[in-house]
Every structure is written in C-alpha cells, then in structure tokens.
Amino acid sequence: MPSDNVLLRTLRHEKTDTLPWVPFAGVHAGKLIGKSAKEVLTDEEALFDSLMAVNKLYKPHGQPVMFDLQIEAEILGCELMWPDDSPPCVKTHPLGETATVPCECTLPTEKDGRIPMVLRAMRRMKEAVGDTTLLYGLICGPFTLAGHLRGNDLFMDMYDDEEYVEELLAYCTACCNRMAQLYIDAGMDVIAVVDPLVSQISSAHFETFLSKPFTEIFEHIRKLGAFSSFFVCGDASRSIDVMCKTNPDSISVDENIDLPAAKKITDRYNIAIGGNIPLTSVMLHGTQQDNMKYVLDLIDRLDDTRNFIVAPGCDMPYAVPVENGIAVAQAVLQPESVREMLRNYIAAEDSITVNLPDYDKLSKPLVEVFTLDSDTCAACTYMMGAAKVAKAHFGDAIDMTEYKYTQKENIIRCKAMGVKNLPSIYINGKLAFSSIIPSKDEFYKAIEAVQ
Amino acid sequence: MSDLCELILITGFLGAGKTTVLRRLLGMNAGKRVHLIVNEFGKIGVDGALLKDLGATMDEIVNGSIFCVCRLDQFEAALDEVQKLKPELLIVEASGLSDPTAIRSLLEQGGRYPDIHYRGCIALADATRLHRVIDTARVCHKQLSVADLILLTKTDIALPDQIAAAEELLHTRYPGIPVVHAVEGNIAKELVDTLSTSHPALDESYARDLTLQKRCLEISQKMAPDELRSFLRLFVEDTHRIKGFVKLGEKTFLVDCVGSYIKVSPAQSDQADNRLVVLASEGMPLRKSLKEALAWYKDSVCEVSQNT
C-alpha cells in the first residue's frame, strides 16, 4: 500500500492536511475512452484502459476496479439484462420459487463467470497504479445478494420464516467472505461491501438479520489485512448507528443522507465516512462551478474533516461530463485555489473588461488553452502538454497561449468566449477539444484545417 | 382543449398486481393518446401488440441502480420525451422497490415540466401478503402513505380474515385514503376519472378520532432547507401530517408533509412562527423516531409544548 496516501491515513483515522478523493467511476470510466457500460464490465482491455483513464484524469487517492453488484448473482444463476449505459439488472431469481439454501460448494471460485477477467484487471491495476492509489474491490452485500437470489419473497420470508432468512444470509455471507478473499489476493486494499437494499428495511430489522453477517464480513476483511467500507444507497439515515456497530473501517453514503449530521454519529465510533456528491442534480446535470461549490460547501459544513472521504454518492452515471469529474478533483486537491476561483466567478462581472482577438483577421492559427490550472490539475496538465507538443511541431506557424482559471481576467475571458468546460482548447476562437485530451494526429489535423 | 398531460402514478410492492391494473387503465382510456413509463420489467409485461391496438406508446426504464432514488436521470429523460410527444395521459408504473415520493418531488421542481399535471397516485396492496411486507419493506409503507387511492387486490383468493385484517390495517394506518377492492385489476372508471391529490387531507379534527399523537417542534432559523428536509426524512414515515410555516435564513417556507411525502416550498407569509405540528396515530413509532431525529439535529430543532 502507498504509505503516504491520504486515503490510507484517513482509513487509519489519522488527521490529514488534505482530504482523500475516491471517484466511483464504474460504467462512467467507459465514457472516458468511448466504451459502453457492457464493454467495461465484460472486457478486460476496456476495463483496464478505462480505469487508467480515470486515474490519469481524476487523480484519485483510491478507485474501484469493478462496480457491478451482479457478478456474484450471475455466477449463482441469475439471468441479467444489459443496458448500454448502466450496470446490468437481475432479471430472474433462482430461488424465487423454492426457499432452499444452496450448498456452499456452489460459492464462486476464481474460475467462475467474470471473476477471472476482474482478477486480471485488478492485478494489472495494482501493478500500474498501486504505488499511488488504493484500489477498491467491490462485492455485493449479503442482503442484496439474498434479494438477487430469492427475489421479492425475501421480504415475506422475513415475516414468515426468520430461520430461513438467517440461513440464506449465512450462505450469502460466506459468498462475501469468498469474494473478499479473492479480491484481496489480487491486490485490493479496500473491500467495499455494497448493499443498497439495506435502506429498504428498518434499523430493527437490520439488527435482527444483518448485524451478525456484516460484523462477520468486516472482521474477516480485517483479518485478511485489508480495509473495509460499508456502501449503502438511499435513505439509510435511521440505520447509520446500527451500521457503525458492525465495525467497518468506513461507511459510504449518498445524497439521501445528511452527511455532516451522519458524521457526528460515525465519529462517535471512529469510523470514516465518504460521500455524497449528488449523482444526477450535480454530477450529471450541474456545471463545473456547481460541482466545485458542492464539494467546498460540504467540507465547510463539517465540524472536523478527519475521517472524511470526498466521493460521489454512489456509482457515477455513465454520462457524467468529464469536466465535472475534473472539477471535483480540483476542488478536493486545490481547495483554496478553487475557493478563489468561485469568488472571482461570482465577482467577475463588472470589474475588468477583456478584449477578445479578432478571430476573422488572424495572421496565423491561434491555439488558446483554457485550464483550471495546468500546474495542479492533471487533466489540464495533459491538455496543456498536448498543446505544447503541437506548438513544438508547428513552431512560429501558430500562436499558442494558456488561460488559467485561477486569474480573474481569465474567468471573464471564459465568460466572454462562452467557454463552458475546462480544460478545453479553442482554435481560432472555436471549440476544438473539450476535457478529453486529443491525440497528436487529431490536434495536428485540427490546426491544418485552419491554416 | 387543454395541452396539459395528466400523470397517474401506479405503485405497489412487487407482485401486488400493478401490470394487471395498468392493462385495465389502458383499456378504459382507449382512444386517448396514452404514454406509459414502465420502471420495471414484469413477469406479465405489457406487450407491443397490446400497446399498438390501443394506440399507446411506452418507455421502459431499465436501471442497474434501480434502488437508488438519486438515479432518476433515466426517468427525467423519459419525461423530457413525453413533453415532446404531448400525450393526453401519462401512466407511470413505478418499480416495486422505488420511492414514490421522489417522482412527485421531481415534478414539483419549479417549471421544469410545466405541461405535466400530477393527477395522483394509485397504490396497490395485496390482501394476501400485505401484513407480511408492510413492516419488513419500508417502501411498502411509503407507497401506501402517499397514495390518493388504495386498491386492495387479490381479494378473490384471499381468506375473509386476511381481507378484514388488511382493511383494518389500511384504515388505521392511512386514514382518509379511500380503499377499494380490485379483483384482476377491475377498477371503476369513475374512480380513475376523479382521482386527485386534493382529497380532504388528514387534519387535526380528523385525527382527533384516532389515538392521536401530536407533537410540536421549533425550528432554528439557521437551518438550511436541505437540512430541514433531512431532519424530516428521519421520522416522516411515522407521521400522517407535518405542517407549519418556517423562516430559514431570510426566506419563508411552507412545510406540508402528507404521509411520507415531504414538501418544503417557498411561501409568501408573515406568519412564520418556525413551529411544526406533527400528527401521528396508533401504531406509529413516532416517539422513538422523533427522539432519534432530535438527537441528530439537537442544535437546530427542539420540542416545545403545544400551548406555548
């Protein structure tokens, strides 16, 4: 594990000067390299390449390798349905008609289903970025897995036949422990037990049915030398306290939970908490400024930032604009600089005027690179690097300049130009590339087209 | 002719018979331009031929994160399309595990869907299974508490004792919401035609007949609207009604929650006393959940005597 990683230190509950950032880029990772959700979740090369793109653009302290809660269910006999832009859904439930508990001989092994592909990708990621980034292995939590296997009758079983539910959950717990072992052996530093169905039951039912399985799983992960995280989706506010009692190293929540209020509870148990950038309203539909502001406001609302991890509320939607991920990263990694940017963005209207070039009368192509700050923002550094390569290639035949958003007059320039996303490259006043770094060939062709 | 598209939401726990009711609704609206948004692939399903016969169109939302109410983006995209199609009636069949309050909240986001009018919610309760899921699956209770009409289904195969117990449970926990029997989705057209959210909401005088629990809360002006919503979420499921005017920062808001549906909307009122009246009745564990909620927000909310 990378010893100076702030996420590692946060999971050890140490105070850190900067905050850790974990983008939950599952299917969204595919968008960065033009691959569909299904490609990312089934093809090793697509998965590895997309994860490397996440690492390069978003500069995370930790990142998941595979965000798909259906891997175990698929192996255990659930049929899946595959949308293009989401993880698969479970379509059939093998225990739907018969309340039996499968033999433990059916538990997934390293040779089953998509597990071999996932393990290979995990090992490659460990080799490639393991010295700087903590890697998350995500497993389907016992309750959601039981729901996948049994279907909706699980809720009636909880009323009719508690003993059966306990036995089925014991089987699912064994499955979780098996998956955790496989993923830790493949180099995963953190095992996230993802259980969205937890928010569908009361805290009393949690204690009756789930306290024991989760406690056992987190203890197992700890014995194997990894960290654990308890992921929930939805409004599980009323269960935060009982979740803490199962003793995970961290908890991850979405926008349905008031994170600063929940953190007062997790702090009592000395458990880290992560979240909860809204997936749709902010990450998918918001602007870069909305994303940066949400992160800074969230940080400002915390009494104590120890034990806090900045992360999306859950698996990022496929179509989240790349620049929004970049904006969040910048807000976490350079909070004071971004704070200044936002202040200037609001105040920039009236104080300074900028003169834009007369783009119709340029003597040679003009490449303008708009960045958050190429010294500190990874994506901006790469974008600026591409521009410098082009400048070296074309020499005096083109003009090239960078405008950093850290300076007030550049914010005004962005507004005047209608620049919506950073980083981006404009050639002769027209948007040429936004967020995704162009290849050398693409860049050269774009310049030659206006020469 | 009005350009407004009427939206009817159908909810019900998995297996309660939503698709059967959906087919019946389609049949009784033959001739109208009807659009469906189906948030679940059911075992029965609505096939393309039936839709074609009835002149209806459909969007199917398949979402791997179907449990997450924060992933309404596919539903939003479908609503955007509906605004272009301009149907007369939009029927939304929500997933058996989805939170029905999220859809209504989305529609009430100022001006985003001006051509869509939320007519109301029909919730289905399976008479044979209601008592077994009402307390194990939180969403089941949520769906019923925000309904404008409850259909008690499968009464043809339920035992008389089961039907009586289900009726008693529904009337006790959801007073004021009409309950009708519906075998094989058979629902009277007049009930659908008169569906409305503006039926007499439960108020104090109604609740006086029940084993009334009434509490009064004082809200700090320093609280942010989102914080208040988070506070309310911690106990709203255990109430019938929460109401009052509050001033948060410099703005006044009306808090008006019915069942599990939370509404905190800007209001023009100089009567904001920052007090919320909370009503609940027999069987609702308000005492416990409110105590926990007050512990979360002890710096911003306190309980006060109703007479002060």
Image (cartoon, coloured by chain):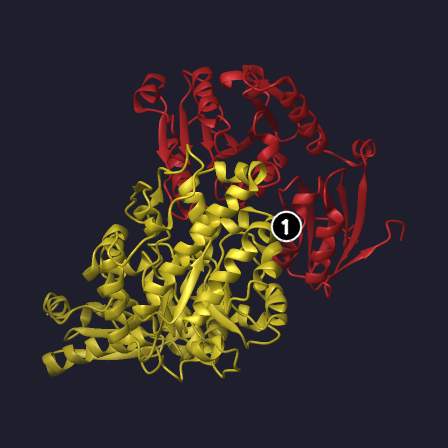
User: Is A78 placed left or right of B16 in the picture?
Assistant: left
Q: Kindly identify the residue that appears in the image at 25 percent across and 79 percent down.
A: A401
- Note whether B80 is above or below A111 in the view shown: above
Under circle 1, the secondary element is helix
Q: Is residue B101 visible?
A: no
In the rendered image, residue A269, in percent from the top left (x then y), is placed at: 61, 70
Q: Colour of chain A?
A: yellow
Query: Residue drawn at (71%, 42%), measured in percent from left and top?
Result: B239
Q: Nearer the viewer, residue A143 or A353?
A: A143
Chain hosting mark 1: A
User: Measuring 27% from the left and 60% from the top, which residue is drawn there?
Assistant: A118
Check disc 1: other Cα within 10 Å, few if <14, some if 14-19, many if 20+.
some
Q: Position of residue A424 (x, y in %)?
A: 28, 69
Rendered position, A37 above or below B123: below
Which quadrant of the figure has residue A382?
bottom left
Left or right side of A394 for B214 = right
